[in-house]
Image: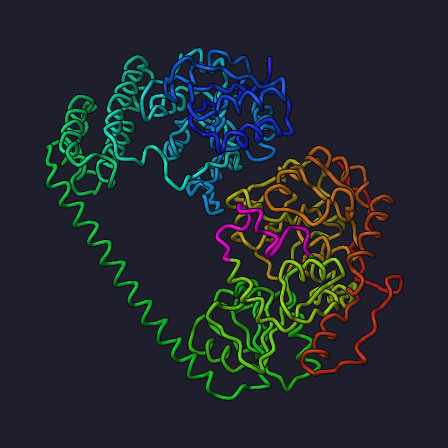
Amino acid sequence: MPRFSVIVPVYKVRAYLRACLESVLAQSYRDFELIVVDDCSPDGSGEIADAVAATDPRARVLHLPRNVGLGWARNAGLAEASGDYLLFLDSDDEFTPGTLAAVAARLERTGDPDLLVFDYERTYWDGRAERNNLASILTAAAAGPEVFTLGDRPEMLRLIMVAWNKAYRRDFITGLPLAFPPGWYEDTPWTYPALMAAESITVLDRVCVRYRQRRSGSILCTTSRRHFDLFGQYDLLFAFLDSHPELERWRPVLFRRMLDHLTTVFTLPHRLPRRSRAEFFRRCRAQYARLRPRGFRPAPVSPSGARYLLVALGARRTFQTLGALRRLRTRAVRTAAGWRARLRTAALHAHYLLQRRRPLDPDLAVFCAYWDRGYVCNPAAIHGALRELAPHIRGAWITTAEHAHTLPPGVTRLEPESAAYWTALARAGYLVSNVNLHRRYAKRPGQVHVQTHHGTPLKHMGIDLMPHPAAAGATDFARLLAHVDRWDYSLSANRHATLVWERAYPSSYTTLEYGQPRTDVFHRAGAEEVRALRERLGIPPGTTALLYAPTHRDYRRGYVPALDLAALAAELGPRTVLMLRTHHRYAPAAGGSAPAAGILDVSGHPSVEELCLASDGLITDYSSLMFDYAGLDRPIVLHIPDWEVYRATRGAYFDITEQPPGLVARGQDDLTDILATGAWCGPQSAQLRAAFRARFCPYDDGHAAERVVRRVFLRETGGLPAVVPLAQRRPAPAPAAALPVSR
C-alpha cells in the first residue's frame, strides 16, 4: 500500500500533460502511485499519458470508454486508489519540487490527520507567478495548534474551494462516503463536506501546486448555461447537511457562501448568456426560499445583507441598478484619488526637472539602503569612512521617519519622494545605495553612482532570475537593466561576487573588488565593545549566545518558522540564548508572539553587525550573512531542511552543502545534536570555516570602506590600503570561550 495516491483526470491537455505528470514522477519522495484517468480525450492526451506511464511502474492509465466529465473521472481514479492519502492534481497544473516529501513529513508530525491543506501559486502564460493572496490564513493556522477542526478555524472556508489543494486520508473519505458529482462546480459538494466533517485538520504553509492560468482563461469564465449547474451542486451540499445533523451549525454559514457565489456568477460579465440572466436570478430567489435556514434574516444595512434581501425579493432590476451605482461610485472614488496622486507626482516631477537645470553640488553625497530603511549596511559603513576621510562632503540619507533614529547626529534626513528628496537626487555629486534608486531618477552627466549590493550572492540575482518566475515575481527586467546602466561602480566582496554581478547585472560600470564595507566593524571592535553590546541586548553573563538568522523563502508568504525555537532552547538548557533575527523583508514582530525562555527576538535591532559581534556562533540557512560572519571567524551551522526546494524555486550559484562554512543540519534533530555535542565549534567546523573564509573573505580586513572612499570620493588611483593577509587579521574576540552547550 503506497503512502499517496495521486489522481490526475485528463481531457484535452496535450500541451501541458507531460510536464504535469513528470512533476509528480520526479518527486524526491518515492512512495506513491500515480493514477491517470483519460476521460476519452480526443486530442491524443491518452497516448501521451501511456508513454509517460511506460517509463515508471508507479504510474498507470485508466482509459474511460466515453467522456464523463471531471467529477466522474476523479471518481474513477478514486475507485482504483490504494494509498493512505489521496491527492488530486489537474492535468494542466504541476507539483512543485519536494511537495510530497513536505506533505509526508507534515502528516507524520501531526499524527495522520483527516485532512491537510497546502498552498498554491498562480502561474501565468507570460511567466508571472503569484502566490495565493489568502496565504496569510495558512500562515496564521501554521503558527497555532498543529491539528484543529473547522470550528477552531472557520476562516479556512475563505480559501479557494477546490479539491487539489488538500491531501485526504482515504479511510476518512470512504467512511463519509464522499464522491464527486457530474457537472460544473463539482468541487463545491466535495470540499465543504470534507472540511466540515474532518475531525483533524492540519496545514502546510508551502506552495505545493503551480496553478496554471491559461491565456484563454478557465472554462468557468466562459459564457454558457452550464453555470446553472451551480444550483444543483448546492442542493447536494445542503442534502449532505440534512444527512449529518451534527453539522447543522454550519448551515447559516454555507447559506451565505451560496448566496455570495450565486450573486457573483450573476454579476460577473460574460458568464451567463444575455437571455438567461433573468431566469438565473429567478432560480437564485427560489434557492433562497427553499434553503433559507430557520431564523435567517438579512441585515439590509450591510452591503451583503442588502444583496441577500434583493435576492429574497426577486428584485433583479434593483439589484442590477444598485450594482451599477456601486461600481460607478467605486470608480469615481478611485479616479479622484488617482488624480490627486497624479497632480502631486506631476508637481514633484516638475520640481525635479527644474532642479536638474541647476549646477551639481560636488560636495553632496546621497545615501540609502534597503528601500529607505535607515542607516545600515554597506552605505552606512562607507558614509562613516567618508565623514572621517573627506569631511568636506556632506552626507544626506533617504529614509522614513520610522528609521530616523538610526541616523548619526548632524546627518540630514530626506523623506522619500519629498521636494527635498528630488532636489538631492537632481543635484548630488554622488549617490550610494545597496538597492536601485527611484525609477524616475535620471542620472546626470557628472553624477557618480555607487552600487554597493548587500551581501555575497548564493541565490540567483538580476537577470539570472528570469528562469525562476516564482522568485522573480513581477520584475521588469528591461527596467532593471536600465537602472543598472546608471551605475558607475559596482562593489564586490570577492571574485565569486564579481563574476556573478557582471553576469547578472551586465553593463559598462567599473567593478571595485574591495571587500564588504559593513564587515569593517568586525575588525575594529574590541572585547569591551562586545561586552557592552551583550549587556545592552540583555544577554546574561556566562551564557552562549547563538544568532539564528534565516533568510526569506520566495515560495512562502510571510515568516514561517523552520525551527521550533522553544523546543531547541529547552534542549540546550539555561546556559544558551538563541537570538532570533528574521529577514528584513518581514516586520520586526514576525518572529513570534510571547517571548520564551532562552529566546531573544532581536529582529527589530537596527544593526545586524552588532548582533554578529554579540554572538558566539551563527545558525542560518541561505542568508548572505554567512559570508560576512565567516570573516568574523566564529562558528557557523547551516540548518537547511528545504535545500532542494529552495534551490529549485530560487536558484543557487553553487551547492552550499558541498562547500559549507560549517556543519550542516538537515532537520531540527540534526541541529540539536550538532549544538549539544559541541561539534558546532569543533575542529571539523573550524576546518570548513577556514576554507570558506579564504574563498569568500579575501578583502574583508577592516579597510573596505576606506578603499571605496579613497577611490570614488578622493579620486585616488594608487596607494589604497593594502589587504591584510588572513593570517594577520585579528577580528573582534568571541564573547565567551567556545564551549559545548549542554542539554
Where residue 108 sits: x, y (%)?
A: 60, 23
Magenta segment main secondary structure: loop
Judge whether 581 appears above or below 46 on screen.
below
Residue at 16% across / 34% down in the picture?
277
Q: How many marks?
A: 0
Where residue 120 sits: x, y (%)?
A: 48, 37
Q: What quarter of the picture does the C terminus occupy?
A: top right
Specify whether residue 469 is painted magenta: yes
Q: What quarter of the picture does the N terminus occupy?
A: top right
Colour basis: rainbow
Where residue 519 sits: x, y (%)?
A: 72, 64
Judge whether 657 appears above or below 3 on screen.
below
In the displayed image of the protein, which residue is found farthest to the bottom? 359
Q: Choose between 74 and 137: the one closer to the eye.
A: 74
Q: Which residues are magenta?
A: 457-476
Residue at 68% across / 47% down in the picture?
620
Specify whether residue 157 is painted magenta: no
In the displayed image of the protein, which residue is found farthest to the right? 727
Q: Choose between 544 and 659: the one closer to the eye.
A: 659
Judge whether 181 appears above or below 227 on screen.
above
| Relative horizontal placement of residue 651, taking residue 320 as reference (left or right) | right
Q: Choose between 448 and 380: the one closer to the eye.
A: 448
Where residue 279 sits: x, y (%)?
A: 14, 29
